[in-house]
Image (cartoon, rainbow, N blue to C red):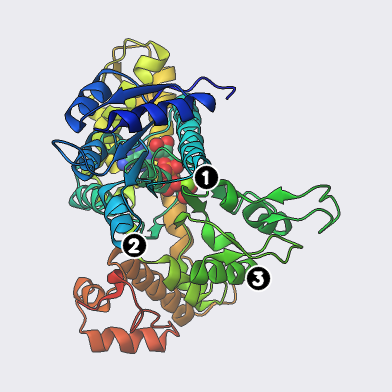
């Protein structure tokens, strides 16, 4: 052992068993502490650090199963090994259900014990490294940092809490700067995988020809420059979470490979033949309009359905104008502390100016605006002068959508606008035709008729996934 590990806690009511475990582990370089009851073990756990627990299933007072239950709720990351008197599948299931990472039937060979303990030691090391990394990166794991009191934002926080502890795949949609990455981080941070790897891959930032090897790894010599074998990021993330950002930017061939991986969990490295398997939870995000990408055949519909088990749609900031003030105050406090400035509030005219802007860059834009204002501001209140001139940008934006482009007829331009409006309504209503029809004050029939006339594909008519339920 080169890294000093905290001790193993051994719990058994038989003295001989305790001592023989202690001797075996000592020979392998582990230190131990011994408890003769579950009650005693809980006391010791509360008082010191351990890297794992080994407990007999049957103990004098509280049983080993009950002990594991308590450990799970108080120290969810502490691995435990259960010892049972004889091996039956039923007992194994009981042990795992109670929260054991592994179980051994007595009598067992020392190698079996060492193997199980080594796995726990490995896990402990991983947890420790990850905690250190996270602390360094200042990773956000708390819901409190997702600001917003608009009903949609409250709903999102609620849904994160519901979905995070499951292993369900998550698809996060929303315009640029609406907080998709923040939500992905919170889902991992509140999941059972929180202590383990969180690997984020930005599919748009990696050149197309390298992305496959980045994700799935490659064998030595599989392409020019592949000087040695390299495991991919999916392997690196084993037991943890992978966040595939900008998923719509992935090439069609790679989409096909990802689909196969999502279907049966197996893949091969680039240039390899060996089927590999990993256990990862997938979160994907994009700021593109996926409906449109599917229509234009840039994104596979079957992949969309695979990814889209739970969908988050983050509202644009202009759809929750009430949150502008809250967010502005929040960023003001964050940057004020960082920059050590005495500016503490927004002048009322500043707030009014912020509220009148339509925020095409969403929360990210607001964050930048406040940061810049704080740098410029010399008084205790942020004055409207310290904000950029929004008005002109706003008009330019509007003009672009409303302009008939050269070569386009008025009807074409109207069709384009209508398609944009319907697409937007689809996205904000979780793709439920019923809700979209309601929001546009049309009957469902009329909406379908229009969509057909506009050549829009009704992708979610019968698709799986909860957001598609035609409620
Ligand atoms: N609800 C929120 N509360 C607090 N900060 C937020 C919120 N939403 C976004 N932010 C902040 O705004 C910035 C942009 O958010 P984020 O990177 O998550 O956006 P995104 O949706 O991933 O954008 P893109 O599509 O461009 O990648 C980040 O600094 C993030 O911390
Ligand atoms: Mg992002």
> In percent of the image, x 22 and y 73: which residue is there?
435
Give whichever of discs 1 and 3 has the lower sequence position: 1
Q: Quadrant of the N terminus?
A: top right
Query: Looking at the image, is 249 positioned above or below residue 106?
Result: below
Q: Label 2: which residue?
A: 89
Q: Is mark 1 within 8 Å of ligand 2?
A: no
Image depth: mark 2 or mark 3 in front: 2
Query: Looking at the image, is 43 positioned above or below residue 430?
Result: above
Residues marked 1 and 3 touching at CB (< 8 Å)? no
Mark 1 secondary-structure assignment: strand
Q: Nearer the viewer, residue 338 or 268?
A: 268
Q: Label 1: which residue?
A: 199
Tell me residue 78's x, y (percent). 35, 35
* Residue 139 shown left or right of residue 464 in the figure: right
Q: Label 3: which residue?
A: 253
Residues marked 2 and 3 touching at CB (< 8 Å)? no
Distance (Cα) linking label 1 and label 3: 22 Å
């Amino acid at each position: 052992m080169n890294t000093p590990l905290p001790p193993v806690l051994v719990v058994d009511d038989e003295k001989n068993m305790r001592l023989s475990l202690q001797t075996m582990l000592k020979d392998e370089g582990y230190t131990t502490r011994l408890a003769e009851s579950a009650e005693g073990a809980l006391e010791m756990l509360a008082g010191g650090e351990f890297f794992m627990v080994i407990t007999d299933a049957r103990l004098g007072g509280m049983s080993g199963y009950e002990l594991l239950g308590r450990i799970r709720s108080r120290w969810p990351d502490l691995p435990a090994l259960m010892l049972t008197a004889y091996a039956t599948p039923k007992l194994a299931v009981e042990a795992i259900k109670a929260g054991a990472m592994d179980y051994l039937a007595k009598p067992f060979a020392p190698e079996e014990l060492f193997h199980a303990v080594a796995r726990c030691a490995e896990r402990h090391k991983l947890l420790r490294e990850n905690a250190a990394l996270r602390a360094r990166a200042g990773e956000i794991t708390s819901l409190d940092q997702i600001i917003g009191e608009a009903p949609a934002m409250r709903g999102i926080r609620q849904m994160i809490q519901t979905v995070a502890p499951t292993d369900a795949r998550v698809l996060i949609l929303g315009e640029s700067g609406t907080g998709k990455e923040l939500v992905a981080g919170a889902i991992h941070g509140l999941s059972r995988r929180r202590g383990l790897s969180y690997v984020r891959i930005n599919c748009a930032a990696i050149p197309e020809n390298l992305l496959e090897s980045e994700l799935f790894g490659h064998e030595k010599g599989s392409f020019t420059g592949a000087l040695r074998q390299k495991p991919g990021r999916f392997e690196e993330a084993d037991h943890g979470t992978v966040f595939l950002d900008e998923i719509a930017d992935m090439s069609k061939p790679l989409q096909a490979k990802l689909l196969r991986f999502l279907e049966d969990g197996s893949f091969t490295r680039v240039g390899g033949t060996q089927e590999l398997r990993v256990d990862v939870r997938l979160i994907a995000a994009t700021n593109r309009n996926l409906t449109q990408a599917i229509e234009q055949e840039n994104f596979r519909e079957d992949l969309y359905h695979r990814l889209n088990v739970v969908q988050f749609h983050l509202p644009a900031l202009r759809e929750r104008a009430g949150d502008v003030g809250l967010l502005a105050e929040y960023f003001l406090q964050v940057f004020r502390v960082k920059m050590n400035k005495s500016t503490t509030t927004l002048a009322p005219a500043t707030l009014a100016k912020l509220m009148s802007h339509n925020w095409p860059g969403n929360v990210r834009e607001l964050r930048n605006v406040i940061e810049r204002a704080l740098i410029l501001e010399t008084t205790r209140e942020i004055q409207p002068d310290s904000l950029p001139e929004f008005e002109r940008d706003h008009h330019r934006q509007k003009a672009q959508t409303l302009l008939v482009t050269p070569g386009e007829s008025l009807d074409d331009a109207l069709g384009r606008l209508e398609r944009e409006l319907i697409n937007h309504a689809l996205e904000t209503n979780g793709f439920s035709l019923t809700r979209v029809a309601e929001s546009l004050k049309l009957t469902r029939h009329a909406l379908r008729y229009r969509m057909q006339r506009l050549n829009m594909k009704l992708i979610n008519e019968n698709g799986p996934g909860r957001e598609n339920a035609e409620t």
